[in-house]
Image: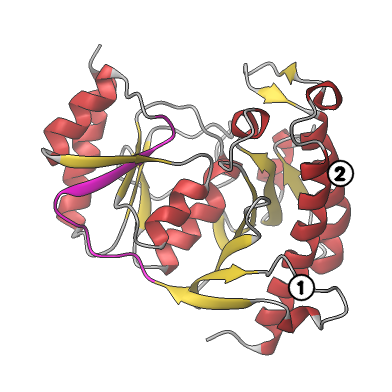
């Protein structure tokens, strides 16, 4: 159960994310103001990313006074120097943001000793948010768009506890894009046989699993970073699911020399350890196939 201190923490994060979302959406659809650039890793960067970054790194330490490592930080190499820190992606799904879809979010995690103890994901376009606290469960909240700021912040939204559904048959796979690469198609057919397919952008894919709308999110390429998955990792764990790297291990954040994630498998509830290992083994096979 959440105590008063937990609820105050979530209220503070929600207030900050609402403020950050307003800034993000002020750029929405304004291609000239976005000033789109391409980073060294061939991903887009906009002025909205930088504005959200500035707000979050300035204000998160006033909630809990910790170092902040952001996707847009220059200090990514400092990850291994901290045992307790904020890890954030100011706009997770920048491509979706540029394309003016709803498939982007703000992703925030607190990492302690290489594992997330808090995860928080906020959707700027819907005012929905999802969060998890270590040992206290996963939740979804809705901050009404019509709420006046005069209302006490802790009473301005409602939330409900979430639980991943048991894996359905046929299984529902969630990915970022509708068109699947041949390697992914082969992996899915070999692993799950008949399956349903749905799409969602950014870390919102984890939220779909936690809410019971999907079962498996596989990643067959090393195309995400630690700030993309940390919040989703604890959300899944607290809701009865999980996230494993292709070698079957649980992610450890700020542990390696790179923030790049290897391929991984995110999943819903009631999978046995043997089944998880089997799916991961098939994932490794798919990765090695040309």
Disc 1 secondary structure class: loop
**Residue visible at 25% across and 11% down in the picture:** 290
**Res. 118 in view:** no
**Residue visible at 29% across and 65% down in the picture:** 165
Q: Earlier in the sequence, mark 2 or mark 1?
A: 2
Residue 173 is covered by the magenta coloring: yes
Residue 27 is covered by the magenta coloring: no
Q: Which residues are magenta?
A: 163-177
Give the number of the disc on residue 54: 2
Contact between marks 2 and 1 (CB within 8 A): the answer is: no
Which of the 4 image quarters holds residue 75? top right
**Res. 8 in view:** yes
**Residue visible at 29% across and 43% down in the picture:** 173
- Rendered view: 28 above or below 169: above
Chief SS of the magenta region: loop
Q: Which residue in the structure is indicated by mark 1? A: 147
Disc 2 secondary structure class: helix
Which of the 4 image quarters holds residue 285? top left
Residue 170 in the image, given as x and y percentages of width and height = 15, 49
Residue located farthest toward the front when viewing the structure as drawn: 146
């Amino acid at each position: 159960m959440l105590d008063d201190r937990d609820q105050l923490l979530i209220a503070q994060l929600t207030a900050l994310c609402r403020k950050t979302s307003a800034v993000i959406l002020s750029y929405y659809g304004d291609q000239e103001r976005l000033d789109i650039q391409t980073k060294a890793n061939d991903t887009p960067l906009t002025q909205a990313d930088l504005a959200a970054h500035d707000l979050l790194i300035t204000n998160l330490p006033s909630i809990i006074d910790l170092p902040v490592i952001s996707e847009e930080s220059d200090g990514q190499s400092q990850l291994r120097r901290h045992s307790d820190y904020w890890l954030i992606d100011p706009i997770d799904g920048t491509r979706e943001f540029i394309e003016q879809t709803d498939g982007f979010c703000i992703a925030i995690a607190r990492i302690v000793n290489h594992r997330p103890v808090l995860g928080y994901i906020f959707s700027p376009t819907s005012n929905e948010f999802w969060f998890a606290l270590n040992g206290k469960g996963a939740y979804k909240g809705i901050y009404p768009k019509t709420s006046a700021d005069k209302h006490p912040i802790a009473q301005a939204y409602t939330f409900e506890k979430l639980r991943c559904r048991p894996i359905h048959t046929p299984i529902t796979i969630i990915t970022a894009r509708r068109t699947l690469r041949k390697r992914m198609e082969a992996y899915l057919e070999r692993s799950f046989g008949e399956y349903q397919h749905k799409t969602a952008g950014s870390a919102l894919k984890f939220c779909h699993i936690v809410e019971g709308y999907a079962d498996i999110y596989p990643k067959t390429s090393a195309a995400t970073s630690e700030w993309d998955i940390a919040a989703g990792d604890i959300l899944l764990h607290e809701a009865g699911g999980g996230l494993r790297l292709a070698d079957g291990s649980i992610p450890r954040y700020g542990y390696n020399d790179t923030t790049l994630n290897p391929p991984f498998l995110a999943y819903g509830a009631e999978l046995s350890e043997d089944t998880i290992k089997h799916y991961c083994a098939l994932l490794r096979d798919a990765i090695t196939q040309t």
